[in-house]
Image (cartoon, rainbow, N blue to C red):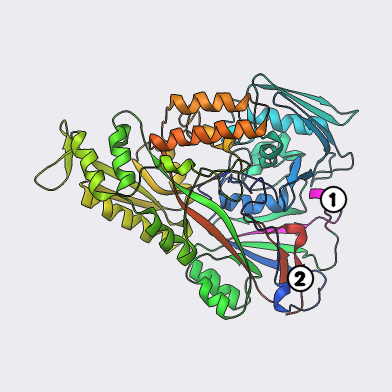
Amino acid sequence: MRPRMSVLLLACAGTFAAATGCGGSGPDDVGARKGSGPVVSGGTFHYAIAGDPGDLDPARTVTDNAYRIFAFAYDSLLDSSPDGEVVSNLATSWEITPTVAKFTLRKDVTCSDGSPVTATTIAQNLNALKDPKMQSPRLPITMSTGDYTVAADDARATVTVRFKAPVSFLSYTIQALPIVCGEGLRDRSLLARGTSGTGPYVLKEAVSGDHYTLTRRKDYRWGPDGATNDEPGQPETVVIKVVPNPTTIANLLLAGELSGARVNSADAKRLEQRGLAEQKHASGLTQMLFNQAKGRPAADPAVRRALTMAVDRGQLAKIVSGPDGRVGQSVVPEASTPCPVSGVNAAIPAFDAAAAAAVLDDAGWAKGADGVREKDGTRLQLNVISNSDFGPTFVSATELVAKAWRELGADVKIAGGNAQVTIQALASGNWDVVPLLGISVAVPSQFVPLVSGPVPPQGINYGAIDNPDYLALVGKAVTTADQQAACKDWNAAEAALFEAADVVPMVALYERWWAAKTATFETTAFDIIPTSIRMRQG
């Protein structure tokens, strides 16, 4: 159940399974409840992802589609159990303080090319993250900072990391680092379309935009909490198909052409009616993010507050997540966060269309003859990003938001695309608002680089946010040894973001995993657990 953080993933973060089980419901054996037959040897597990993962170098990629492959091909130093307990993976033991982390490694781990995995291997991964040439988006997600040193002792199989300044929740965030080894470390260009890891499967074929084929390693015995890869019924081959349309995924599941997949759209009703086994997780959040760069409309706090107040988040929750849809309460999924979030969302400007118009009036944004507001000769023109990777409900919800903003007096233009297109648009700076941006984090500290620090390409502060109150409270939180006291500061820091309308939690999301009769598997909110898959007689 490896925690992760991810941007544009919409699966609790990063991207990144939750630190406490990511969504409250632990892994479940999907398929077994529906009377699947006995296990069969070998076989091929067919799986689907919503879009092409692009670059497969784990240090360069934090998208959900890439993580589907990483889950099969890589391990991390630590992992999490279903109840949120930190468990072993490549590290058998660990000692972590705010400024020093020491990991003792297994000595029997080998890379997919047969080479040994040593303390030096781990150190190379950690140092690669902070290499300026890498410009890794995973650095702030995993380590919080690049200001650290790494010492490797191969004889004792230990790796020691020393931080110049305190960091928080490292035992969770370090789980977001897939460990690269062997030839992939010697030549990282091989990772663009291949894998080089210690995981239970190895990528053998990559056909961009179509499918990715992985084969089972037969010597794998160092998985999370001691998981192995030689249990009866484990598939010899995994084929991950790129299927952007959720209706097509549902059809393939019903036809038996997929063994398992994630379907959250209205098509899930058909799967439920046909009796396919399901596991549902409260999994993630969408956030509304504004571009506050100089010259953009949302650089004006009044614009951000008005746009927030003009949107009925409760209505959007029902559109995106159905009757059970809930409004987001925090920057971390409610069931996942190590810090209680009660009351934090009180700082979010409430829905009130009339009050939103008054805010803009008072700020000098007056309606012109065509109904579009202007201030000092500048029109309130909004370039809005809509991510199409997550099905028609997200598109419909974005259009509803745009309608509300047009009624408020904005000239709204929507540009859509898949996750890769969305990331490129965010990095370009030529945008104003993303109403439903999936930012999945497991712990509050992982959110910091997304709302502070350098903008792309030096960082991942896409919205060019600069909130001194937030940063002051974060600085206090990371130096507080007592977690309860630290959580009080983390929650106050979130409230500072909400008060300034720098970011707005929008919709709490659910992940629904489905299994055909030919397979069973355990799931987290983010992924199918590779070592849990069992092929069965249909």
Q: Earlier in the sequence, mark 2 or mark 1?
A: 1
Return the x and y of residue 285 as percentages of the image width and height: 51, 50
Seen as rendered, the residue at the extreme top is 164
Vertical order, 197 against 474 (above or below): below
Residue 435 is left or right of residue 410, and the answer is right
Tell me if 280 is positioned left or right of 325 in this view: right
Quadrant in the picture for residue 105: top right
Mark 2 burial class by Cα count in 10 Å: few <14, some 14-19, many 20+: many
The boundaries of the magenta stretch are 211-229
Q: Who's the residue at 47% across and 70% down the image?
A: 266
* Whether residue 313 is visible: yes
Q: Quadrant of residue 474?
A: top right
Q: Examine the rendered structure and indicate whether residue 79 appears above or below residue 99.
A: below
Percent across and percent down for residue 152 are: 81, 26
Looking at the picture, which amino acid does disc 1 mark?
Answer: Gly
Q: For mark 2, give the secondary structure.
A: strand
Amino acid residing under circle 2: Met
Secondary structure beneath disc 1?
helix
Residue 213 highlighted magenta (yes or no): yes
Please give left or right for residue 211 compared with residue 92 in the image: left
Does any portion of residue 502 appear in the rendered image?
no
Nearest the camera: 242 or 223? 223
Q: Nearer the viewer, mark 2 or mark 1?
A: 1
Relative to 379, say whether 399 is above or below: below
